[in-house]
Image (cartoon, rainbow, N blue to C red):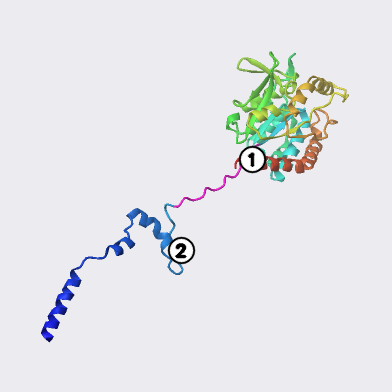
Amino acid sequence: MAKRLLALLGVLLLAACASPQSPATVAATPALPASAAAAEAPSALPAAPGKPLAANPLAVKPAAPRLPRAPRIALALGGGAAKGFAHVGVIRVLEQAGIRPEIIAGTSAGSVVGAIYASGISGEKLYRRALTLDEDELKDFTLSGNGFLKGDKLQAFVNQQVGRKAIEALPRKFAAVATNFDSGERAVFKSGNTGQAVRASAAIPNVFQPVSIKGRRYVDGGLVSPVPVLAARELGADIVIAVDISAKPVQRKSGLFGNLDQSLAIMNQAALALELKQADVILRPRVLSLGAADFDQRRRAIREGEKVGREALPVIRRIVAAWQQRAQLASR
């Protein structure tokens, strides 16, 4: 009997080992494709103690928010002969406050200061150069009915100061504004010989001889663009700070340069109003009592530029902040 029971148990054990797996068990654990398994692995497996989970290569990272660029700030420096030293004071104060214009447009005296500043020097270096400037470096008298100064020295001086770089090679964008002597049209020099362009921009009629460039004659840009705001806009400026040192027609001065100031002021009033209408900030250093050829008063002119620059800083900062806010809203 015992032998029969053992034989029966052996048969049952062999049958159990040979039977297939239950279909219900297979359905409960479906096999994942290799790609799906890889995608689920990081979220399914807990991190080892002290070790972060591996980054999911298929996860989409949120795009970093785009920050609006800083506004392109320009200086539009007007003409006014020796009163142009005030431009140096304005630039010095702006830099001390962390405001560094990257675009410079200049007319006449403004083109002289503007070209040198556009060469990449700091406001402090510009200030020191202004104090050491010898007036004789700019004078080359001649006997001519077109003007008693040739302008060769002015051209050479500017080219020496900018390292003989062409306008388009200057570190800061620069334009010198002159007047086409034959057509009366505004001419904006954005490339070419820097000293020659400045010489044309500063060629005061009957003082400097007209400058010939590519067969055309040019004279002082103050006749058509006393403060070159439009030229600054053409260079891509977002914010334009205009510095107006022009005399007003109510001023009555004697002498050659006094009469010249008066004549130019009367002629360019309409052009001045048109230009200033396009500016964001207008600075007017109190230099109208200074003579057009009064180099001895340069320190006073610089101080007046510094003073009006400091007074304008809160306004300039508000305008910059408002521009940045609008740019940020537009980038969303």
Magenta part of the protein: which range?
Answer: 59-72
> Is 191 drawn above or below residue 313 in the view shown?
above
Viewed as shown, does residue 74 lie left or right of 303?
A: left
- Residue at 78 percent of width and 42 percent of height: 310
Mark 2 or mark 1, which is nearer the start of the sequence? Answer: 2
Name which residue type carries label 2. Answer: Pro
Evaluate whether residue 282 shows in this view. yes
Dot 2 crowding, Cα within 10 Å, few <14, some 14–19, many 20+:
few
Secondary structure of the residue carrying numbered label 1: helix
| Main SS, magenta residues | loop
Check disc 2 and report the residue beneath it: 52
On the rendered structure, is 21 left or right of 305?
left
Residue drawn at x 11%, y 86% as measured from the top left: 1
Q: In this orientation, which residue lies closer to the viewer: 236 or 110?
A: 236
- Counting from the top left corner in percent of width and height, residue 270 is at 78, 21
Residue position for label 1? 327
Q: Tell me the quarter of the picture where residue 21 sits.
A: bottom left
Q: As displayed, is residue 138 above or below residue 93?
A: above
- Quadrant where the C terminus sits is top right
- In the rendered image, residue 89 lying in the magenta stretch gets the answer no
Of all residues shown, which one is farthest toward the bottom?
A: 2
Q: How far, Cα to Cα, is label 1 from label 2?
A: 39 Å
The amino acid type found where label 1 is placed reads Ala
Disc 2, SS: loop
Q: Left of 269 or right of it: where is 183?
A: left
From the top left corner, tell me how far across and down residue 218 is, in percent: 68, 18
Residue 80 position within the rendered picture, expressed as x and y whole percent measured from the top left: 77, 28
Q: Is residue 124 visible?
A: no
Name the side, left or right, on which 156 lies relative to 32. Answer: right
* Disc 1 packing (10 Å; few <14; some 14–19; many ≥20): some
